[in-house]
Amino acid sequence: MDWQISEDTVPSAPITETDARQLLGRPPATGAWRDGDPAGARRFAAFGTLTTEGGRELPGIRLAYETWGLLNPARDNAVLVLHALTGDSHVAGPAGPGHPTAGWWDDLVGPGKAIDTDRWFVVAPNMLGGCQGSTGPASIAADGYEWASRFPYLTIRDQVAAQVSLADALGIEAWAAAIGGSMGGMHALEWGVGYPDRVERLAVLSSPPLTTADQVALNSVQLDAVRVDPRFAGGEYYDAIDGDGPHRGLALARRMALLNYRSPTELNQRFQRSWQSGKSPLGHGGRFAVESYLDFHGNKFTRRFDANSYLTLVEAMNSHDIGRDRGGVDAALARVTARTLVLGIDTDRLFPVEGQHRIAAGIRTTIGDGAVVLTSDFGHDGFLIETADVGLHLRRLLQG
């Protein structure tokens, strides 16, 4: 769970009047990409029925995805890049129609960069259940109405099953690498364990072997923040006019999440006890600068995301346990045959480095002496911000 787009992953800073003007006007009922919106660089792949682990059926699913570089004749240079909770397929490239912000890993994907598109054919799908072109709660079901509250519970394994269908459709028998951070790291790890013959290299960044009780607890508060918003209306809000959707609950969930994505060091250094304006927050109606920062990013988020998708994806994260029905975590990790990079951030309070150490210890093909731990003030979001250091280790993985 992280900011996931370039404009949101910059170091924290006080909110200016210019920032505030970006959010003038009422937020839409959903920030989802909808059919009829500009496609931008998205491509689409449609598949037949997907039966979830829970036994529900999703007929006619679709994945939105983007690609960079060229697939070689041997089809052995494909790299799968997997986004985190609130990311999308726009890993690299400028903002423009269909893409309100630039790519969230623009520093790492492109010609001559760590994931060199002169060599690699990069594929980045929007995960199943998302809201940026792939089938999700905001998508239209067969009856002509949004799935909304009817959308089925998904697991990480369901989402990876959809990605397997995409690989098959593209004629990719094995990925040269599967790379993911945070929730995307859960997907990458599931590829390595569930489909070891289809992944040659693996990068698991800032991701755990399973979602712990503590992490489920943190997630549960965010889920309730969305659901208790009266305008959530049990998930049936898509006909609401601008300003009447569940933006308050979704923004509150986002503000809660941010506290897990960044570190106390960064927030304390950036904001200290500064005021947002000349009006004192000590009983005189003013606000601390950090409060305005959280509000701004929470409100900004509602304009690019969907409340039902947020619930669907957070619950999918809760499902993550690489050892479930596989004899436990260690037995599952022993299945991985890919050359693997495991990387964590020392200040990550969402997915602490103990989880990355456990993954690295359980995979026999981990490069180096175990998990790489980067020093950063940016907490969990460090894998998105510390691109020079992350890129150094991705190069090491991909050159082998």
Image: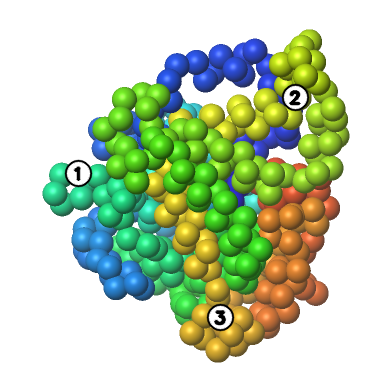
Q: Is residue 353 left or right of residue 313?
A: right
Q: Is residue 129 placed above or below 28 in the rendered structure?
A: below
Q: Residues within 10 Å of mark 3 (few under 14, many from 20)?
A: some
Q: Residue drawn at (55%, 56%), measured in percent from left and top?
A: 220
Q: Most extreme residue toward the left, as rendered?
A: 143
Q: Mark number for residue 323?
A: 3
Disc 1, SS: loop
- Residue type, numbered disc 3: Gly
Residue 14 is situated, as x and y percent measured from the top left of the image, at 73, 24
Label 3 vs label 2, nearer the camera = 2
Of callouts 3 and 2, which one flags the residue occurring earlier in the amino acid sequence? 2
Q: Is residue 121 placed above or below 332 in the rendered structure?
A: above
Q: Residue drawn at (43%, 66%), measured in percent from left and top?
A: 155
- Residue type, numbered disc 2: Ala
Residue 211 is situated, as x and y percent measured from the top left of the image, at 60, 67
Q: Is residue 73 left or right of residue 333?
A: left
Q: Which residue is label 2 attached to?
A: 289
- Choose top left, top right, bottom left or bottom right for residue 360: bottom right
C-alpha separation, residue under disc 1 versus residue under disc 3: 37 Å
Q: Which residue is label 1 attached to?
A: 145
Of callouts 1 and 3, which one flags the residue occurring earlier in the amino acid sequence? 1
